[in-house]
Image (tube, grey):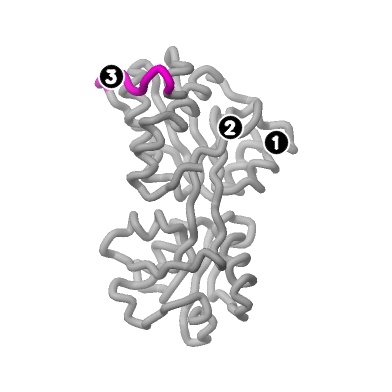
Amino acid sequence: MCSFAVLVLVSGACGSESDPETASSATGGEVVVFAAASLTDAFGEVGEAFMTANPDVEVTFSFAASSSLVAQILEGAPADVYASADRDNMAALADAGAGAGEPVVFANNLSEIIVAPGNPLGITDVGDLADPELVLVVCAPQVPCGTYATDIFDRAGADITPDSFETNVKAVVTKVTLGEADAGIVYATDVRAAGPAAAGVEIPDDLNVIAEYPMVTTNGASNPAGAQAFIDFTVGLTGQAILAEYGFTAP
């Protein structure tokens, strides 16, 4: 399990009386957050802001495919919070009795075609991805971004065969930005995060799928108070503002 801790030693207060992030506060200790790979950049900043507001807390993140994280939790990996990029993997966690309480949807996202800067192959729509000479990569079918890609191809009525299936959305981005693939299906937030290293082709609303991101405290949480405080902070004004900066939309 890959994880990293982000420590902020500056104390501050965030939110308002109506802001959910003030509903609970972490008293201290470590909060371990297992989160979908597409949340890597945004949650890094959310974690910093959370620790600024709760200086006695250390937040440690583990980012991977939502399906992989569920498997790790069910195998006994220590996690206080689970944040998924879809409802199906959250349901798998709940069905196994590993979630505590009702999950909270805290963000939405959309899929987008990622291509090289300047879109040298002139890809304009999903149908163009059926070109057999084009190297296309997507996430594995059990990974949320892979499920969304399959749904999009079905809605488009296009016979599309990817050349490679990746373990998570960041791996798809990497293959395209390194020139190992011509195009991929990722989240709009991933194209934005890639900056000048990639370009994006929007997928029409009638073909696209809204990705809903739910989050929950796990039944095995060693710091349930801290976990709930992190969730409250993420759905609060500060957390939502940070997510918006990275291209996520409010649920």
Q: Give, as a single range, the part of the protein colored magenta.
A: 9-18
Q: Amino acid at mark 2?
A: Val
In the rendering, which numbered label is found on residue 216?
2
Residue pictured at 40% horizontal, 73% vertical: 180
Judge depth for marks 3 and 1 and give the one in front: 3
Q: Amino acid at mark 3?
A: Gly
Q: Which residue is mark 1?
A: 94
Under tag 3, what secondary structure? loop
Residue toward you, 156 or 79: 156
N-terminal-most mark, 1 or 2: 1
Q: Is residue 10 magenta?
A: yes
State the CA–CA distance, disc 3 to disc 2. Answer: 25 Å
Query: From what the image shows, is residue 9 above or below residue 68?
Result: above
Q: Amino acid at mark 1?
A: Ala
90 sits to left or right of 178: right
State the CA–CA distance, disc 3 to disc 1. Answer: 35 Å
Can residue 1 be seen by looking at this rendering?
no
- Residue 113 is situated, as x and y percent measured from the top left of the image, at 44, 68
In the rendering, which numbered label is found on residue 215?
none
Residue pictured at 52% horizontal, 86% vertical: 132
In the rendering, which numbered label is found on residue 12?
3
Q: Residues within 10 Å of mark 2 (few under 14, many from 20)?
A: many
* Residue 61 occupies quadrant: top left
